[in-house]
């Protein structure tokens, strides 16, 4: 493959094909779809964080103008609960507490926003009006909000009297204890990882359409993995044969994890449509999204790092409380455990690591994966404690990290926390970042800022992530209740164009472009003749969808595997047409050629013969040129890199401005550099948002105080700088997938929060500030300065 | 129920509305112009920005009756046929969008920024975009797109 010569092949910054509809307003998102005879659902939600439901009176609502039906939990008695997809066992061997997550609250509400009843009406306005007529008698209970006091609070679920979901651990506790006993220095830090609202700009939306004639239901859903939703809704909630449920995820306006899960509202519209024989639609408004979309992060951790006299890390211990909210969301249990603690080796040779994670139920919105999902939490605690250790042992933070790196010669590298890294070169990305950030010249910039009355700080962070989720055997061994493969199908059409069907789903990532690049590149078919189909269970093979930076590494590899089958069959067809043996045919530049000659058949000619098989060896070959493959990854992929942030703080106001941000990433092979850079920029914005602005704050009564865009500070254009991103220089392609790709979707959000907080602490070093929790709001920074001043 | 008369993307349009009906509902539900999106309920995100009598407004915050007699341009009216408006082209060329959901409102705002500040610098563009949220891009490429689009409109 000659990548330089192919302007639409692998490595080219091809302009996105999907943009042609999006910039014209011709995208087709779920809420844009209107069905004949449709009705509108409106959800009555709990105003209380924790309360018994004494009585629900729906009679006035049911009689109101335009109302088609009113639904409460009593109507849904035959439905199962919303399932959790990952079983974690506590360290004593007991399975996690897995109380039922009912579609509508059964006798008790457990968070503000818990769904209590539904009105289905001819118009949304009629449904809202009727909802006002529903009378719910609540008997409020004390709310459990603070994780550290949860054990003393009233139990949310009977199955979990102390409000603990599990008490899990990983690593060699005794070895860590030994390491700390002989350490020359121990650095200890308590920190929080602040709770975030994912806030895809498209609110969740669902439409269910029941066809009585066939008994089939079609669900349109703003979701990242339609096959998974079909499986969860069909097999667990409805016990409905899967072939009677078609799930379509059309254009989806961002997900970031929050649209992986099977939500109550999906089950509600499916059930209601079946009852009334008419389509039922529901679209969240933003206020509802804040109290019903799964939220992210929310850890409290004590971390300790043991160093020897030379600064080598000899032991790491982390004790984490992880908030899972009121119910277990689809992947809530895997995020603070497998996706978090297995990353605690980071980029370093720390030989002994132990992590204990206690997951706690609270009267808050369920917590699940949000961009990065466990890996930002791991990176944050590790790179914070390393930075603090550098301060305490008076070492340069870059050099302390460097002397602890896993060396390129040490790969494959088995960490003490289960993962085996296949490849990496962490010194390379550190050097790239230090050079791009002009690290050596920082003192000059700090002095110049000081002259302007500003405190300038610089922060470094390395990150590593386990992406390409996941090898099915590993997932299964660790409690996963699903496989980690992906599907791909290639149909070479009779006239030579190609239809690509993938189980991955694009909701901003640009797969319609990058997957077409991969196929065009390998099959030698013009880019504009390749069409990518995704997001419809009736049009794509069973697939696991898009999350965990897995699409190119797993979904892309499935396409390679399917194309290998296409080429193998094409060789047989060409050999027949050219009257040579299969072994004599080679495939290159879109043509099947008799090796060593100029005799050839283009892939278009071969395809035409495959579909018009007038002269075809039917005893040896089937007609058609369409192949399907499932790819199960051999290992995770391990993108890694170094981020450097520079901030300037106004000491009078506490306002922190990000003045420079450098990212050096190793994503392995790059398919489309423009799209990869865009993914990093977006991840950085979310990470900077976490570190500076965003925080879901609950009052002691369980009310979400930051429940709108007026209270929850989303990053805006003037909160962010231009970024210096170098991703094209990728030293270490992934060793175990055919494309050499690692994935790039989450890195920005993983590595940036800690780089920023390290920079803030560095800026405040003259006051002796050792740590500041996220988000570093002006008030928090100002208070840190005042507190430090008052101590001196 | 009252009737509202509008000119939308150059064509006369009438709709029967309730007093509480929002302009964005008329565009999306009555006129099937679903390019204008709704991303919040507090007038913060800007996904619903359209031009009313040439000025950018958040159509989720305007009652349909308030727009009676007005000329409305939505994202669908910005260009005709195969050609893209220079700002639409710039958003594509600069990779100024990912999921595409904020994009219509972002482009309608950007066109207005370019009209008022034809040679806007980065800081001005970032300040002017304060009423439009994007969760995907980190804004860097949106800023570049507005600059590129504004330059193309100047030469237009």
Image (cartoon, rainbow, N blue to C red):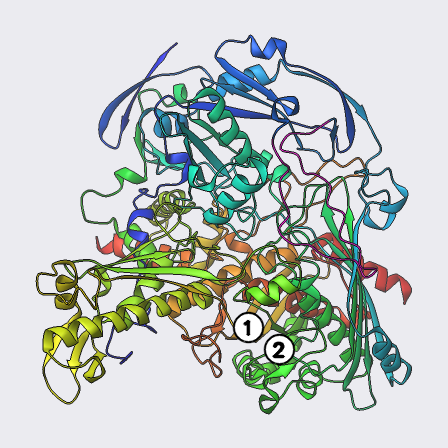
Q: Which is nearer the eye, A291 or A737?
A: A737
| Residue A440 image position (x, y, % from top left) | 61, 85
Question: Which stretch did the figure color magenta?
Answer: A79-106
Work out whether A18 lies above or below A411: above
x%, y% of residue B85?
A: 25, 48
Any magenta on residue A308?
no
Quadrant, the C terminus of chain A: bottom right
Label 1 resides on the chain identified as A
Mark linked to residue B108: none
- Characterize the magenta stretch by its predominant secondary structure: loop
A415 vs B93, nearest the viewer: A415
Up the image or down, A35 lies above or below A536; here it is above
x 19%, y 84%: residue: A584
The subunit letter for the residue under badge 2 reads A
Point out residue A513 in the picture as x, y percentages from the top left corner: 33, 60
Mark yes or no: residue B56 visible. Answer: no
Residue bearing the label numbered 1 = A635
Q: Are marks 2 and 1 on the same chain?
A: yes
Residue on which the image places disc 2: A420
Q: Secondary structure at mark 2?
A: strand
């Amino acid at each position: 493959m000659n990548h330089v010569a192919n302007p639409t092949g692998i490595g080219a910054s091809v302009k996105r094909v999907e943009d042609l509809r999006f910039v014209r307003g011709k995208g087709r998102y779920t809420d844009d779809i209107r069905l004949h005879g449709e009705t509108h659902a409106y959800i009555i939600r709990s105003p209380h964080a924790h309360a018994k439901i004494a009585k629900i009176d729906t009679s006035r609502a049911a009689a109101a103008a335009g109302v088609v039906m009113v639904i409460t939990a009593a109507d849904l008695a035959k439905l199962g609960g919303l399932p959790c997809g990952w079983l974690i066992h506590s360290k004593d061997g007991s399975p996690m507490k897995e109380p039922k997550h009912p579609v509508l609250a059964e006798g008790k509400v457990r968070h503000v926003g818990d769904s209590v009843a539904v009105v289905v009406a001819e118009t949304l306005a009629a449904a809202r009006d009727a909802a006002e007529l529903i009378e719910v008698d609540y008997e409020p209970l004390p709310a459990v909000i603070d994780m550290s006091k949860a054990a003393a609070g009233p139990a949310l679920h009977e199955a979990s009297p102390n409000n603990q979901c599990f008490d899990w651990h990983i690593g060699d506790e005794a070895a860590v204890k030994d390491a700390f006993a002989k350490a020359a220095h121990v650095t200890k830090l308590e920190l929080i990882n602040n709770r975030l609202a994912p806030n895809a700009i498209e609110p969740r939306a669902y439409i269910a359409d029941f066809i009585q004639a066939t008994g089939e239901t079609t669900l349109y859903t703003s979701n990242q993995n339609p096959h998974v939703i079909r499986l969860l809704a069909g097999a667990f909630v409805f016990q409905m044969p899967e072939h009677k449920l078609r799930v379509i995820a059309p254009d989806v306006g961002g997900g970031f994890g929050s649209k992986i899960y099977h939500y109550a509202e999906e089950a509600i519209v499916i059930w209601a449509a079946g009852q009334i024989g008419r389509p039922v639609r529901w679209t969240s408004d933003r206020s509802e999204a804040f109290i019903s979309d799964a939220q992210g992060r929310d850890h409290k951790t004590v971390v300790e790092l043991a160093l020897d006299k030379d600064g080598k890390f000899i032991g790491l211990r982390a004790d984490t409380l992880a908030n899972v909210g009121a119910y277990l969301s689809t992947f809530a249990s895997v995020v603070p455990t497998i996706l978090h603690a297995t990353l605690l080796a980071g980029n370093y040779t720390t030989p002994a690591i132990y992590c204990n994670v206690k997951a706690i139920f609270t009267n808050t919105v369920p917590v699940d994966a949000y961009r990065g999902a466990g890996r930002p939490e791991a990176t944050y605690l590790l790179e914070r404690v390393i930075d603090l250790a550098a301060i305490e042992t008076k070492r340069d933070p870059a050099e302390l990290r460097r002397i602890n790196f896993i060396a390129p010669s040490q790969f494959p590298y088995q960490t003490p926390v289960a993962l085996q890294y296949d490849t990496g070169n962490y010194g390379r990305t550190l050097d790239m970042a230090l050079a791009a950030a002009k690290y050596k010249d920082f003192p000059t910039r700090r002095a110049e800022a000081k002259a302007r009355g500003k405190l300038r700080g610089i922060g470094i962070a390395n990150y590593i992530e386990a992406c390409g989720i996941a090898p099915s055997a590993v997932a299964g061994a660790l409690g996963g209740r699903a496989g980690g493969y992906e599907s791909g199908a290639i149909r070479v059409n009779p006239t030579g164009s190609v239809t690509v069907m993938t189980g991955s789903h694009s909701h901003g990532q640009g797969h319609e472009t990058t997957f077409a690049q991969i196929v065009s590149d390998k099959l030698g078919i013009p880019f504009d003749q390749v069409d990518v189909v995704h997001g419809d269970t009736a049009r794509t093979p069973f697939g696991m969808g898009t999350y965990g930076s897995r699409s190119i590494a797993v979904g892309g590899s499935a396409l390679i595997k399917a194309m290998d089958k296409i080429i193998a069959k094409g060789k047989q067809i060409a050999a027949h047409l050219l009257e040579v043996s299969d072994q004599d045919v080679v495939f290159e530049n879109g043509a099947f050629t008799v090796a060593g000659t100029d005799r050839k058949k283009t892939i278009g000619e071969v395809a035409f013969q495959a579909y018009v098989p007038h002269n075809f060896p039917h005893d040896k070959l089937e007609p058609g040129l369409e192949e399907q493959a499932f790819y199960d990854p051999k290992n995770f992929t391990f993108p890694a890199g170094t981020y450097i942030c520079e901030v300037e703080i106004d000491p009078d106001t506490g306002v922190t401005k990000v003045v420079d941000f450098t990212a050096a990433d190793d994503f392995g092979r790059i398919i489309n550099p423009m799209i990869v850079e865009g993914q990093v920029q977006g991840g950085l914005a979310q990470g900077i948002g976490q570190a500076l602005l965003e925080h879901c704050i609950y009052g002691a009564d369980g009310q979400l105080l930051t429940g709108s865009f007026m209270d929850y500070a989303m990053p805006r254009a003037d909160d962010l700088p231009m970024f210096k991103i170098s991703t094209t220089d990728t030293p270490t392609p992934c060793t175990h997938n055919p494309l050499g790709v690692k994935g790039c979707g989450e890195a920005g959000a993983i590595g940036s929060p800690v780089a920023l907080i390290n920079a803030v602490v560095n800026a405040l070093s003259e006051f002796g500030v050792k740590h500041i929790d996220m988000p570093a709001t002006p008030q928090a920074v100002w208070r840190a300065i005042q507190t430090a001043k008052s101590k001196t | 129920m009252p009737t509202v008369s509008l000119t939308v993307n150059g064509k006369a349009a009438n709709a029967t509305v309730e007093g509480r009906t929002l302009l964005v509902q008329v565009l999306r539900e009555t006129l099937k112009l679903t390019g204008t999106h709704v991303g919040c309920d507090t007038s913060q995100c800007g996904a619903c920005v359209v031009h009313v009598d040439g000025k950018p407004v958040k159509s989720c915050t305007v009652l349909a009756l308030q727009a009676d007699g007005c000329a409305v341009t939505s994202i669908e009216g910005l260009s005709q046929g195969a050609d893209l408006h220079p700002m639409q082209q710039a958003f594509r060329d600069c990779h100024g969008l990912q999921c595409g959901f904020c994009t219509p409102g972002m482009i309608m705002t950007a066109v207005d920024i370019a009209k008022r500040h034809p040679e806007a610098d980065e800081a001005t563009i970032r300040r002017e975009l304060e009423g439009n949220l994007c969760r995907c891009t980190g804004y860097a490429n949106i800023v570049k797109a507005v600059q590129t689009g504004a330059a193309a409109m100047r030469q237009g």
